[in-house]
Image: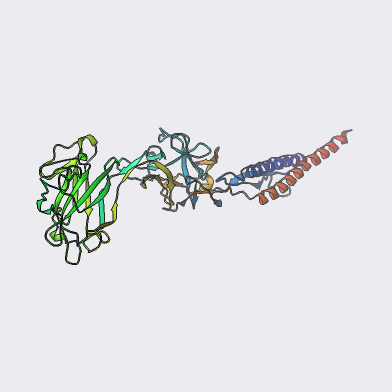
């Protein structure tokens, strides 16, 4: 009966507009939700009869909710270095638990990148979802494998701990005064029996150096050590006796030929124009390779001319290249005051974690207070053939569906995946002006559908009154 179909059509109108109202309500409620994608109820007609000339029977309307997941939101600047947004396609891969994630465990995908460190050092957003990425391996490398989901791990910052780097290179920029008066002790100087390393101002033992340069270095544990270069002008023009020693001497153990912490002894020669004459310098066995080779504390007794760190230090071996002629200026001999312009070394003492930075390639880097930076992981970006087909779940996240297709893991900026924008968050895609307009039209449509039901009810009442 047409009146019944009209009433049922009115009911479908109420149901469809209720769905539209629910979608609009969800949008308005999430206007400030990070990474939220607006939804919309799309209407389509229901047809019950196609026969020509037959009495018309109303079919009504049905509503299908569509989420505009691929619509990008406006990035907004924040002050947190762990706030992330994606500039382009893709989603952050997240899990509900931080540890023990297996291949069969559910992965979710989100654009809500408001990640913060939890008590265990994991990056987690407000929904309690943990950020996944490729973490650094035991060799310090980050191996990305888009085809193996088990390689993705929860990004953990606390596992990094402190960091230190041993010194491997030192450069000296200094001048030795060419008009330096000869020391009265130069004639008695001997690198083994009466050396500068033996000098003691209290007892008068040894030979007092004309000039000394201290070089701070870091051992394998980040401990601070000191190497000192002593110079004594020789009786021959443009020649200086030189010794390199550890201060204090107890920091090293030396073999035969080296005394009082000596590491190297010999001559430093200069050209007539005051530049270092590398060919005539005998401080190192190979003038082109001025390297001090320290044995580890655990090594056996050093041989003749060799040295190692003292057993009590418990540090590893290291090579320190001591450049005297390659720095800007280097070691010179001009007729001006003996002075040190600069001493530059690499290596740092032990440092504590102070900050976490994430770049546009998704590399998570730990910054330490001693200047060291160390990569921890790289954030993985998941893309889909049809991202609008993803299934929404609680926490402003999505999961795979048949319509979305399977995920593909990519590094940020590769294969169509977007870049990471650090210290930004993706705003909701809700436009309040459009939602309020839709709210008005939906309310009117709902009222009109209810009017259909009341009108059909009145017509049925009239029909029933015929019997009376």
Residue at the far right in the pictured view: 468
Residue found at x 73% / y 49%: 53
- In front here: 364 or 279? 279
Q: Is residue 342 above or below residue 69?
A: below
Residue 415 image point, x, y percent: 42, 53
Does residue 73 appear left or right of residue 277 in this picture? right
Does residue 41 appear left or right of residue 95 in this picture? right
Query: Where does the N terminus fall, quadrant-wise?
Result: top right
Does residue 396 appear left or right of residue 446 in this picture? left
- In front here: 430 or 439? 430
Residue 441 image point, x, y percent: 72, 48
Residue 33 image point, x, y percent: 58, 44
Query: Where does the C terminus fall, quadrant-wise?
Result: top right
What colouring style does the render use? rainbow
Camera sees residue 96? yes
Q: In which quarter of the image is residue 55?
A: top right
Camera sees residue 377? no
Residue 202 image point, x, y percent: 20, 42
Residue found at x 19% / y 67%: 273
- In front here: 449 or 181? 181
Q: Quadrant of residue 294?
A: top left
Looking at the rendered structure, the number of numbered marks drawn on it comes to: 0
């Amino acid at each position: 009966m047409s009146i019944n179909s009209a009433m049922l059509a009115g009911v479908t109108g109420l149901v469809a507009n209720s769905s539209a109202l629910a979608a609009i309500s969800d949008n308005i409620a999430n206007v400030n939700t990070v990474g939220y994608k607006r939804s919309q109820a799309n209407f389509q007609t229901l047809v019950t009869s196609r026969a020509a000339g037959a009495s018309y029977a109303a079919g009504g309307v049905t509503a299908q909710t569509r989420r505009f997941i691929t619509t990008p939101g406006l990035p907004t600047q924040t002050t947190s270095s762990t706030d992330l947004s994606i500039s382009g396609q893709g989603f952050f891969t997240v899990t509900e638990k931080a540890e023990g994630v297996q291949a069969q465990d559910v992965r979710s995908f989100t654009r809500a990148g408001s990640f913060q460190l939890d008590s265990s050092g994991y990056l987690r957003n407000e929904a309690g979802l943990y950020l996944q990425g490729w973490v650094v391996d035991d060799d310090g490398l980050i191996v990305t494998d888009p085809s193996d989901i088990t390689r993705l791990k929860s990004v953990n910052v606390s596992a990094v701990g402190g960091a230190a780097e041993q010194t491997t290179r030192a450069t000296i920029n200094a001048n030795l005064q060419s008009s330096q008066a000869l020391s009265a002790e130069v004639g008695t100087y001997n690198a083994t029996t009466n050396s500068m390393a033996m000098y003691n101002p209290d007892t008068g033992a040894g030979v007092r150096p004309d000039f000394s340069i201290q070089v701070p270095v870091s051992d394998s544990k980040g401990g601070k050590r000191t190497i000192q270069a002593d110079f004594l002008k020789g009786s021959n023009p443009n020649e200086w006796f030189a010794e390199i020693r550890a201060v204090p001497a107890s920091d090293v153990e030396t073999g035969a030929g080296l005394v009082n912490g000596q590491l190297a002894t010999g001559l430093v020669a200069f050209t007539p124009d005051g530049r270092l004459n590398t060919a005539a310098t005998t401080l190192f066995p190979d003038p082109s390779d001025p390297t001090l080779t320290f044995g580890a504390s655990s090594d056996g007794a050093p041989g003749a001319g060799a040295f190692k760190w003292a057993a009590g230090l418990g540090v590893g071996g290291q090579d320190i290249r001591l450049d005297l002629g390659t720095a800007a200026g280097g070691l010179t001999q001009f007729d001006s005051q003996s002075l040190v312009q600069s001493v530059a070394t690499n290596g740092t003492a032990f440092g504590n974690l102070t900050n976490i930075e994430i770049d546009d390639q998704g590399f998570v880097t730990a910054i330490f207070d001693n200047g060291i930076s160390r990569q921890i992981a790289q954030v993985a970006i998941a893309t889909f053939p049809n991202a609008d087909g993803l299934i929404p779940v609680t926490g402003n996240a999505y999961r795979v569906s048949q319509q979305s297709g399977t995920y593909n893991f990519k590094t940020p900026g590769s294969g169509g995946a977007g870049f990471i924008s650090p210290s930004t968050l993706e705003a909701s895609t809700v436009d309040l002006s459009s939602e309020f307009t839709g709210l008005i039209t939906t309310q009117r449509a709902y009222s009109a559908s209810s009017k259909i039901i009341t009108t059909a009810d009145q017509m049925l009442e009239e029909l029933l009154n015929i019997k009376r």
